[in-house]
Amino acid sequence: MLNYRELHDPNAEYTMRDLSAETMGLTADRGPRDVEITDVQTTMVDGNYPWILVRVYTDAGVTGNGECYWGGGDAEIIERMAPFIVGENPMDIDRLYEHLIQKMSGEGSISGKTISAISGIEIALHDIVGKLLDVPAYQLVGGKYRDEVRIYCDCHAGDESEPESNADEAERVVEELGYDAIKFDLDVSSGHEKDRANRHLRGPEIDHKVDIVQAVLERVGDTADVAFDCHWSFSSGSAKRLVTALEPYDVWWLEDPVPPENHDVQREITQFTSTPVTVGENEYRAHGQRRLLEEQAVDILAPDLPRVGGMRETMKIANLADLYYIPIAMHNVSSPIGTMASAQVAAAIPNSLAVEYHSYQLGWWEDLIEEDDLIENGRMEVPEKPGLGLTLDFDAVEERMVDGEELFDEEW
């Protein structure tokens, strides 16, 4: 069996696509249906969010990489889930996913950290199966509509409360980095607040948010689509006043203007205004998104793939949204692994609008993998290599691990 570094040596005479079934531990008598999962491991990387990377190992020497949504507890949940899939065939992605949902029902497998943990395993299974079958992950979820996916950049200015500071950063990101889709925060202090806990916006606070929108759009509105995020911050009445004040402007979307729990209020806000409203990152699985769609409480849906249930669950959500002619703009704060999983699905759905990128200021985001130039001019090309098409750089992962974490095994 060739070792990991030999297989990923860029000067080697072979590539992953050149590997024979025999090299991968498979023979004529032992095909993909005879492969078994042998282990599941995790490592947490200290990015601009704590990225929990997941590796699923098999007795065929093929290993898959996944990622689950940031937050403490996911690694421990995955450790508890590992015995439920060790010995199983990784090819049975849907069955294993439902198996984990059922086995973890006592820990709340309809939402929260449990679903996020299952998402990380599910993504890794797609990486494994793609390698076993020698096809890209997008092929496993139906094939592709597009060769590259539009990426929107979540931007942060030096002084986010200053309209011109936001406009300066918008201009820099568009002109220097090549993005034609960006997003800024509107839940920033205006200096006029009396009590932020009550979610009420006074007139000067609304004026301040309009000033930010106007400044950014005047600077880049002719060359880029611009969205604005409210992070569930405002009361129903204040949200109505804000969306009304923004209607004269060409806002790409206004994200999460009210808290996510009350769907009745969410529906009322969305139907109240012509300003497009986006929600969805705080909902889990297709069941969680269903009411938003059925009640027409959303203009653009924003599921987070490593959080919502993984690649196939996101496909279900996108297909459900397509019945209501709703586009998908995936929320994403992931490392390259989770981001590429989102891009693979975005390539395979008709209603993909864009995928979020949240690490443009980090500097070393792409160092975690051996591939280069994942995002160019605001686009991510979907690779034709098997699985997710990415190779972890174990030295970089080890260098960036959260203190106290252990590096998972390199052998594949």
Image: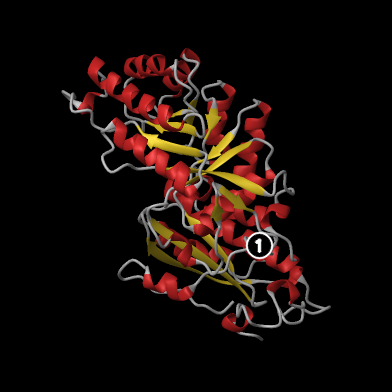
**Label 1: how many Cα within 10 Å (few below 14, some 14–19, many 20+):** many
**Residue located at (26% from left, 33% from top):** 162
**Residue located at (66% from left, 83% from top):** 12
Q: In the rendered view, would you say 80 is above or below 178?
A: below
Q: Is residue 90 visible?
A: no
In this orientation, which residue lies closer to the viewer: 230 or 285?
230
Can you say which quadrant of the picture contains the N terminus?
bottom right
In this orientation, which residue lies closer to the viewer: 22 or 379?
379
Point out residue 119 in the picture as x, y percentages from the top left corner: 53, 53
Coloration of the structure image: secondary structure
Q: In the rendered view, would you say 271 is above or below 321?
A: above
Q: Is residue 114 visible?
A: yes
Point out residue 22 in the picture as x, y percentages from the top left corner: 76, 81
Can you say which quadrant of the picture contains the C terminus?
bottom right
Q: In the rendered view, would you say 21 is above or below 180?
A: below
**Residue located at (82% from left, 78% from top):** 29
In this orientation, which residue lies closer to the viewer: 183 or 6?
183
Point out residue 193 in the picture as x, y percentages from the top left corner: 19, 25
Q: Which residue is mark 1?
A: 387
**Residue located at (66% from left, 52% from top):** 94
Point out residue 230 in the picture as x, y percentages from the top left corner: 36, 31
Judging from the image, what secondary structure is the residue with disc 1 in?
Answer: loop
Which residue type carries mark 1? Gly
